[in-house]
């Protein structure tokens, strides 16, 4: 099994939202298993050989997109894949779905507890969310595509926007681009994101701009207004976004339109739609219960 990602699929599409023009970089169209920024972050591992490695180990949440991509990588490379979660809810254990189900089908070995600090040399350790130096390889490719596109379109005043988890994609993108990269923390707060940036790049001049959400959204919790933003985007642009990062991204973008005045905006669609398989039913249950109470 081998995967050749066709990067020409990631076109930049023009949409209108919030009464202005945006371009959407469609990284969600890249590949079913390595969609969005996971295709970029893990490209280094896809394109290189690791003769001494027979196992890949990582950690994170039980529905992570990175976990699913790593399970496919391991299968392709004939590696064992061991994944550490700090807990697993019993519902998911008995009703596997979404990224978790896909990863288990790819023979992921699940460990509950903390990941050990050291491993033998046959083990490739991937930080949570792929937050490590090898991610630069594929993100440089994304930066090159953006430069070529802006050149062809003769766009000089451009800002790039993308929502962040670990901040790895935003940070490396800014390193490779002269255009300003703007992001929003979705997993932790602004301080957490700043720390992430500093752990990967000590020169703050090379950090992306961080916009602060006007309201604290706890990661993976349900907020009716976020689901409404997802629905409006789908209705008005025909593009489906994912439900963890993008609705926070668009909300904060809408709160800060002034920051982008006089500039074209390229929004990076980082994929993650597989996760909607679990998030959408959660929202639908929540909204159903709400109408029940109201009616
Ligand atoms: C992983 C992921 C992110 C977060 O990327 P970071 O590089 O960790 O900031 C954002 N959006 C989607 C859809 C993702 O899958």
Image: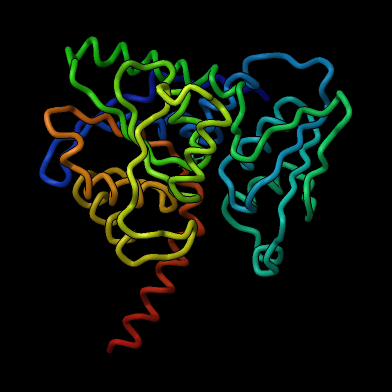
Q: Quadrant of residue 158?
A: top left
Q: How many marks?
A: 0
* Image point (18%, 17%), residue name: 155
Residue 130 location, quadrant: top right
Q: Is residue 257 left or right of residue 139?
A: left
User: Looking at the image, which residue sits at the far right?
Assistant: 120
Q: Taking 295 as reference, is 193 left or right?
A: right
Residue displayed at 35% across by 86% down: 292
Q: Nearer the viewer, residue 79 or 217?
A: 217
Image spot of residue 179 (x, y percent): 29, 20
Quick one: quadrant of the C terminus? bottom left
Q: At 37% across and 47% down in the image, what residue appears? A: 246
Say left or right for 115 vs 95: right
188 or 25, which lies in front? 188
Colour scheme of this structure image? rainbow
* 74 horizontally vs 290: left or right: right
User: Dividing the picture into quarters, in which one does residue 89 lie?
Assistant: bottom right
The residue at the point 67 percent across, 14 percent down is 48
Residue 122 position, x and y percent, is 86, 25
For the residue pair 85 and 75, the one nearer the viewer reads as 85
Estimate the x, y position of residue 218 in percent, counting from the top left: 46, 60
Looking at the figure, which quarter contains the N terminus?
top right
Image coordinates for residue 125, horizontal then vertical, percent: 74, 31
Q: Is residue 124 above or below residue 289?
A: above
């Amino acid at each position: 099994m081998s995967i050749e990602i066709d990067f020409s699929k990631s076109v930049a599409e023009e949409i209108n939202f919030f009464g202005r023009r945006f371009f959407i970089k469609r990284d969600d169209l890249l590949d079913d298993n390595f969609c969005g920024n996971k295709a970029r972050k893990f490209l280094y591992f896809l394109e290189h050989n690791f003769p001494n490695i027979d196992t890949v180990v990582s950690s994170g949440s039980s529905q992570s997109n990175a976990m699913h991509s790593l399970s496919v990588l391991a299968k392709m490379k004939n590696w064992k894949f061991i994944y550490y979660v700090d807990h697993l809810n019993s519902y998911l254990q008995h009703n596997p779905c979404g990224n978790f189900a896909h990863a288990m089908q790819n023979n992921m070995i699940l460990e509950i507890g903390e990941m050990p600090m050291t491993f033998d040399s046959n083990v490739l350790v991937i930080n949570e969310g792929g937050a490590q130096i090898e991610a630069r390889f594929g993100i440089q490719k994304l930066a090159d595509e953006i430069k070529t596109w802006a050149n062809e379109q003769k766009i000089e005043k451009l800002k790039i926007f993308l929502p962040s988890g670990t901040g790895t994609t935003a940070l490396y993108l800014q390193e490779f681009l002269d255009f300003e990269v703007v992001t929003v923390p979705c997993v932790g707060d602004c301080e957490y994101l700043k720390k992430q940036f500093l752990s990967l790049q000590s020169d703050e001049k090379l950090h992306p701009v961080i916009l602060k959400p006007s309201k604290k959204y706890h990661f993976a919790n349900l907020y009716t207004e976020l689901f409404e933003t997802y629905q409006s985007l789908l209705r008005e642009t025909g593009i489906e976004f994912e439900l963890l990062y993008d609705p926070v991204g668009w909300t904060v973008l809408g709160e800060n339109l002034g920051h982008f005045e006089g500039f074209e905006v390229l929004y990076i669609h980082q994929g993650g739609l597989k996760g909607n398989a679990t998030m959408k039913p959660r929202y639908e249950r929540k909204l159903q219960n709400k109408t029940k109470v109201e009616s």
